[in-house]
Image (tube, rainbow, N blue to C red):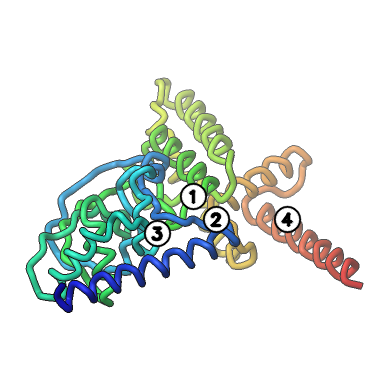
């Protein structure tokens, strides 16, 4: 048995040992213990388009998962460390080829945002990472999704992405207003926004004496309703004062307060509604802080 063959087997066993200890740690912390499949995330976010991106060197640390179904990702952990002993023969052959400078075919990957998911070449990625390589040659397919795809999507994030993708499919805002970013941090808010768009479309139809299609109403709503409120939100620097909120979250809460103030005969408009939202949040923050202080006393 050659020296490189022995070294390859030793490195495989060492990498598999690291995977084992990582899996024990993951069991204790409840984290994912195997390579993540991008398929559930793509289904939730909605694939808008695929396009060939050519062959090029890509950073290995940007490869974060697999395109294979979950059932086929059990050979590697999230760091592409080998888990199953049955992969040793193939892993060690690729190791020897890389160390000896043999030319290997490019791996195949999906690129989603700035992250990569392996279609074919899991063993080559595993070996290259183990050897400390920075890049790997890859044939890239660029994938665009309707909704943004979070890098470490949990079930809650997937539900949010699915809601956003369905909202965009209905309104077509990703096409008519590609600059629009209407991400909500809480489930259920897109239904409320759709009600606003439907109401806006109803009044457009009355004014124009025709049935206004929903995508057209959505584009008009974005220009004439959402955008002015978003400008007021930015003017008041609201997101810096409400950590974890998105601009669309604030829009929903501001419009609620705006409508309630109008019913009560109070001053209306985005500015008074924003000021009231910030006051309510400040009062809630002090109440929570007071409860913590009492509990610690």
Percent x, y of residue 72: 33, 45
Query: Which class describes the residues within 10 Å of circle 2: few (<14), some (14-19), or many (20+)?
Result: some
Q: Earlier in the sequence, mark 1 or mark 2?
A: 1
Label 2's element? loop
Kindly indicate whether the residue at mark 1 contacts the one at mark 3 (C-beta within 8 angstroms): no
Would you say 85 lies left or right of 133 here?
Answer: right
Q: Residue at x 73, y 55 (%)?
A: 276
Q: Residue at x 40, y 51 (%)?
A: 148
In the rendered image, which residue does mark 1 sit on? 183
The one of 198 and 133 positioned closer to us in this rendering: 133
In the rendered image, which residue does mark 4 sit on? 276
Kindly indicate whether the residue at mark 2 contacts the one at mark 1 (C-beta within 8 angstroms): yes
3D distance between C-alphas at marks 3 and 4:
48 Å
Q: Residue at x 26, y 57 (%)?
A: 122
In the rendered image, which residue does mark 2 sit on? 246
Q: Earlier in the sequence, mark 1 or mark 4?
A: 1
**Foreground tag (3 vs 1):** 3
Would you say 292 lies left or right of 14 here?
Answer: right
Q: Earlier in the sequence, mark 3 or mark 4?
A: 3
3D distance between C-alphas at marks 2 and 3:
33 Å
């Amino acid at each position: 048995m050659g020296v490189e063959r022995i070294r390859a087997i030793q490195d495989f066993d060492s990498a598999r040992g690291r995977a084992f200890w990582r899996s024990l740690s993951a069991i204790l912390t409840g984290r994912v213990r195997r390579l993540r499949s991008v398929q559930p995330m793509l289904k939730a976010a909605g694939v808008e388009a695929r396009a060939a991106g050519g062959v090029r060197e890509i950073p290995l640390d940007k490869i974060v998962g697999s395109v294979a179904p979950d059932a086929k990702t059990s050979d590697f952990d999230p760091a592409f460390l080998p888990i199953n002993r049955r992969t040793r023969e193939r892993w060690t052959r690729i190791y020897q080829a890389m160390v000896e400078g043999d030319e290997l075919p490019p791996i195949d990957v999906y690129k989603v945002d700035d992250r990569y998911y392996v279609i074919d070449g899991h063993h080559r990625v595993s070996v290259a990472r183990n050897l400390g390589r920075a890049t790997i040659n890859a044939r890239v397919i660029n994938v665009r999704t309707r909704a943004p795809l979070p890098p470490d999507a949990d079930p809650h994030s997937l539900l949010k992405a699915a809601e956003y993708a369905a909202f965009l499919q209905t309104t077509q805002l990703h096409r008519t207003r590609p600059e629009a970013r209407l991400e909500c941090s809480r489930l259920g808010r897109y239904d409320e926004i759709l009600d606003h768009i439907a109401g806006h479309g109803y009044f457009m139809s009355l004014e124009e004496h025709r049935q206004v299609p929903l995508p057209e109403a959505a584009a008009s709503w974005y220009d004439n309703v959402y955008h002015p409120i978003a400008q007021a939100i930015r003017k008041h620097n609201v997101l810096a004062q409400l950590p974890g909120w998105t601009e669309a979250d604030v829009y929903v809460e501001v419009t609620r307060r705006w409508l309630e103030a109008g019913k009560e005969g109070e001053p209306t408009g985005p500015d008074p509604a924003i000021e009231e939202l910030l006051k309510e949040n400040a009062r809630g923050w002090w109440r929570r802080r007071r409860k913590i202080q009492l509990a610690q006393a």
